[in-house]
Image (cartoon, rainbow, N blue to C red):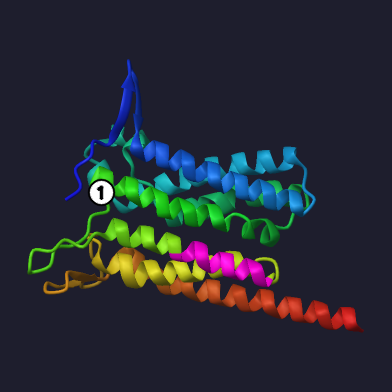
Amino acid sequence: MLSISPVLFEIGPFTVRWYGLFMAVSVGVGFFCFLKGGRSLGYDDDFLYNLAFFVVLSGIVGARAVYVMTNWDVYAKEPGMIWRIDLGGLSFHGAVIGGILGALPYMRRHGASFSALADYAVPGLAVGIFIVRWANLINQEAMGRITSHGFRHPTQIYGSAIGAVLFFIDLNLAQRHPPSGYRFWSFVFYYSLLRGLVEETFRANPLYVGGWVMPQLGAGFFTLTHLLTPFFVALAWWMRRRTLTKNSQAEAMHRK
């Protein structure tokens, strides 16, 4: 079992934790990719900086809100811990939903394309998943189930591997130059599928709807993420098809 202090260093009252460092790195990488992509589409820096600010802020709020709601039995006893995001506890689904809700009003006000810009957020999201899961491992959170043979699934490493797979899937898609939005919805599709089938199955999260566990494999069904996975997979699949259909129609109109 990995045993590393969650605190990287302390200077007086100032504490830097691995979780915060990895989160800051993932945001930095994501912003760099987003800024470069946004510039290639002709958007100016002021717009992109402001949009990134709204996305990050609302993403953090959404991520924390969903995590607290799904772990309310813990935070109801210690409500003061709700604000301690430096200790970890952010929901990826909540971050994406919060980020989108925070971005849409600003983008509509400036007539910006959500689909085109969302594609350039994917590399940062994939890198964030890859990096932050290691912070979960250091913090000893998002733990895996233990099999009847005494093996604990390293679900943080499973999750990190998913981030790496998503990054290379997006890299491959980017080289094909698909229609706007296709990369983003492909990311949502593959992440939801891999998270639900691999990481979530072996993660020691609370079970719902007559949940049951396979002790020999350390697999558990059904967590809240399991229950939400079909919805996200279906939505992402439909949106991917929609981007292809709209692109085909636009090309047909152009040929006329």
Q: Amino acid at mark 1?
A: Glu
Q: Is residue 169 magenta?
A: yes
Residue drawn where x is 12% and y is 67% of the image: 147
Residue sitting at 32 percent across and 64 percent down? 224
Q: Say above or below: 78 vs 174.
A: above
Q: Magenta residues, as a range? A: 165-176
Q: Position of residue 44 (x, y in %)?
A: 77, 43
Work out whether 242 lies above or below 39.
below
- Could you tell me residue 136's position as x and y percent? 31, 48
Alpha-carbon neighbours of circle 1 within 10 Å: few (<14), some, or many (≥20)?
A: some
Q: Is residue 87 left or right of residue 246?
A: left
Q: Is 131 placed left or right of 34 in the picture?
A: left
Q: Is residue 40 placed above or below 86 in the rendered structure?
A: below
Q: Is residue 54 left or right of residue 144?
A: right
Of the pair 95 and 45, the residue shown nearer to us = 45
**Near-viewer residue (190 or 72):** 190
Residue 180, image quadrant: bottom right
For disc 1, the marked residue is 141
